[in-house]
Amino acid sequence: MQFQDILKNAESEGKEKHVPVIEIGKGKGEGGADIVHVVVGKETPHPNTVEHHIAWIEVFGMKQDGQVINLGRAAFAPAYTNPNVRFQVPVAEFKAFCALAYCNIHGVWENCLEA
Ligand SMILES: [Fe+2]
């Protein structure tokens, strides 16, 4: 088994939407900073209860030279905070962004976006 075997993506998706959707907002942050926005359940909200929730989102970027940077991680309080997070990132330094999202029932979900 390899680590990638536990990662799920859009092909595994059921009626509850788990795939982390990544959006890049160049100049859309405070003071004109670039933003990487990640949300789970953009179209169909994922349940958000103690019993079933998105526990965290983690974001990685691949720089132009191939170096991978762990850009940040957000952990959520079930029933209180939604899996919807923005990171201020110098987007031009990266060629791609990838996100992981963890549902306590349905596992780890992945997605990537070319910058
Ligand atoms: Fe789930």
Image (spheres, rainbow, N blue to C red):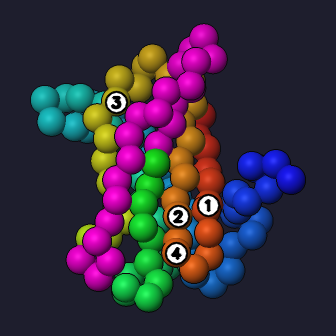
The residue identified by callout 3 is 89
The percent coordinates of residue 27 (x first, y second) are: 27, 31
Specify the amino acid type for callout 3: Val
Magenta run includes residue 49: no
Which of 7/26 is in front? 7
Nearer the observer, disc 2 or disc 3? Answer: 2
Label 2 with label 3: CB-CB less than 8 Å: no
**Secondary structure category for the residue under label 3:** loop
What range of the chain is rendered magenta?
59-80
Nearer the observer, disc 4 or disc 3? Answer: 4
Label 2 with label 4: CB-CB less than 8 Å: yes
What residue is at 31 percent from the left and 47 percent from the top? 86
Q: Quadrant of residue 65?
A: top right
The residue identified by callout 4 is 104
The residue identified by callout 2 is 102
The residue identified by callout 1 is 109
**Secondary structure category for the residue under label 1:** strand
What residue is at 34 percent from the left and 53 percent from the top? 74
Specify the amino acid type for callout 1: Trp
- Disc 4 to disc 1, C-alpha distance: 11 Å
In the visual, does 45 lie left or right of 12? left
- Disc 2 to disc 3, C-alpha distance: 22 Å
* Comes first in the chain, label 2 or label 3: 3
